Image: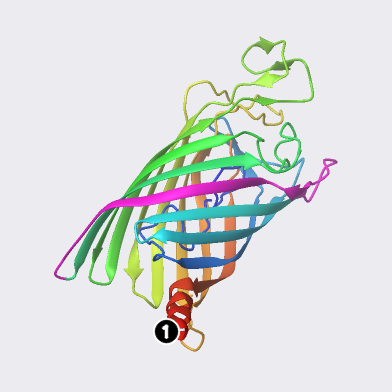
Amino acid sequence: MKKLYILFLLFAGQTFFAQTEIDGIMMDKKQLCTGFIYEYSSWSNYWEGTYYRENLNMGTVSTQKTAINANYGLSDKLNIIVSLPYVTTKASAGTMIGQKGMQDAALTVKYMPYEKSFKNNTLSFYVIGTYSFPTSNYVADYLPLSLGLHSKVGLLRLLGDYQFGSLFSTFSGAYAKRSNITIDRNTYYSDQMHYTNEVNLPDAITFNARFGYRTDRLIAEAVFDTWTTQKGGFDITTNNLPFPSNTMNMSKLGLNGKYNLKKISGLALIGGFNHVITGRNVGQTNSFYGGLFYIIDFTSKTKKTTNNEK
């Protein structure tokens, strides 16, 4: 997101937080958690390759993202998660016009094959698969103001979570396989000339670690996240615009929180912040987000209907 994955955007730090694919939380069988998240991110400085510089030509580049998310428990060990975002981009200076529209939908299957509790501790492992795809015909070759990279992405993640009392730690790593894209020109230059409109996007590896406090009422956590492009990318050339197949590496730190309201059972407020601390061909982004989620328990409705029939 994530919290996409979902697809990582150049110059946009995306960390969404609810019952997501990158935490150690599962929805119970026949429970649906649904709601929306709003995120605002911006940057004015960026890394051109490894050279850190100011972006005077474009000023501050900002992204607003609103996503509708839903997580349904097919069983206590198997969840289905969907996300559909709407994105708006803008630059405070220069002549490039911002974009807006639907971005990339994501479908995630989250499976917990192992969980063991002993005393006040719980150890669990997860296998997570995500597939994301563009939902509109936005232009990818318009960085840094494009809505996304217009690539289909398959991501496989392994995750481990250990809770000791009210404290927890979660570690995960994932490999993202990205499809090629086509652009609206027949030639382009990377580190060599290409006489084609097809662009090969390099795959990527991501790592996520989170530590914090977790109860049924409150979750507060610190997050460290990385995204590392594999072979095939190249650096932004001096004083040039970024390109979809650039190497895009970043590390970021964040704080997330979630609070389940006492007076309205099932309603939760979420919010957080993250900051890119190091990067390569990415902006040094600050992101703020907040959202509202509600859990619908279809199990209780089924039990009530069954009792009425008797």
User: Residue 116 lies in magenta, yes or no?
Assistant: yes
Residue 45: x %, y % from top left: 63, 45
Query: Residue at image x 73%, y 18%?
Result: 197
Q: Which of the two residues, 216 or 187, is positioned nearer the viewer here? A: 216
Q: Give the quadrant of residue 239.
A: top right
Q: Mark 1 points at which residue?
A: 310
Residue 141: x %, y % from top left: 73, 31
Count the marks.
Answer: 1
Outermost residue to the right: 95
Query: Residue at image x 25%, y 64%?
Result: 163
Q: Is residue 114 above or below residue 179?
A: below
Asked whether residue 75 is in view, the answer is: yes
Which segment is the magenta one?
90-119
Asked whether residue 10 is in view, the answer is: no
Q: Which amino acid does label 1 sit on?
A: Lys
Query: Residue at image x 58%, y 34%?
Result: 281
Outermost residue to the left: 119
User: Residue 106 lies in magenta, yes or no?
Assistant: yes
Circle 1 packing at 10 Å, graded few (<14), some (14-19), many (20+), is few
Q: In this view, does 46 lie above or below 295?
A: above
Residue 247: x %, y % from top left: 55, 29
The structure's colour scheme is rainbow
Outermost residue to the bottom: 263
Left or right: residue 136 compared with residue 300: right
Q: Give the quadrant of residue 142.
A: top right
Residue 102: x %, y % from top left: 72, 49
Q: Which of the two residues, 185 or 29, is positioned nearer the viewer here? A: 29
Q: Main secondary structure of the magenta part?
A: strand
Identify the image quadrant of the C terminus. Answer: bottom left
Q: What element carries label 1?
A: loop
